[in-house]
Image (tube, rainbow, N blue to C red):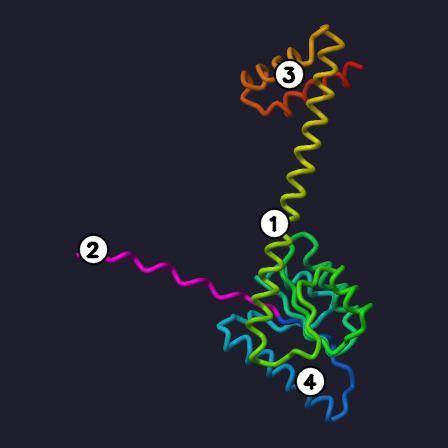
Amino acid sequence: MAPKRPNAPAPRNLRIVVVHTEPQPLRASEADEAALRAHALNAGLLEAGYEIVASLPADMHLPEQIALLQPDMIIIDAESDARDVLEHIVVATRDERRPIVLFTEDDAPSSMEAAMAAGVSAYIVAGLQAERIKPVLNVALARFKQEQKLLAELDDTRHKLAERKVVDRAKGLLMTRHGMSEDAAYQKLRTMAMNKNLKIAEIAQRILDVEDLLG
């Protein structure tokens, strides 16, 4: 009889911060509608097994609160114009990006474009029903992960290109100063890097730094 495999650890619940717009004076019907929206959102999150770590207003303290709570995702509940809340969210996620889902009744293309440019992963119009919460968040999370992967690949490509430019400059310097061929200059850099246990680009940058220092 084969030994039992240990049970895999249960996935950690997604920790969510809900951000709502500052309440304006509301008529009774509007207050009821806002309460229904909040209830649908909370119910959908809890039914899907997510953890609501806080419900916060979109004010100047939001960046500090998000940095303290470290949520996995931010959900914005903005019935209409969300420009003010987006400004606070941009500040709050500037140094550490997170998936952001915006539920709103504002279907203006300009509002949607502004939200996506601010980093919103999913802009959901008239879709705040409890049963839709989980699939919407799953799509937003998948899209966010893909965007982060593409950004990381782009950053890696830029870094490698910058390193190549540094190596090419150092090779050119060695070729000029010592009459080396390009291959010989590269081999010189490679040998120096191996001896110092450094990357070739790091040795190349040191050579350029010394050249700048000595003029």
Which numbered disc covers residue 149? 1
Q: Secondary structure at mark 2?
A: loop
- Report the Cα–Cα distance between label 2 and label 3: 56 Å
Side of 98 relative to 59 (left or right)? left
Q: For marks 4 and 3, give the one nearer the viewer.
A: 3
The quadrant in which residue 40 appears is bottom right
Tell me if label 2 and label 1 are in contact, CB under 8 Å: no
Q: Residue furthest top?
A: 179
Q: Circle 2 sits on which residue?
A: 2
User: Which callout, 4 or 2, points to the residue nearer the camera?
Assistant: 2
Q: Which residue is mark 4?
A: 34
Q: Which residue is mark 3?
A: 186
Q: Which residues are magenta?
A: 1-17
- Check disc 4: other Cα within 10 Å, few if <14, some if 14-19, many if 20+: some
Marks 3 and 1: in contact by CB < 8 Å? no
Residue 143 is a magenta residue: no
Q: Amino acid at mark 3?
A: Tyr
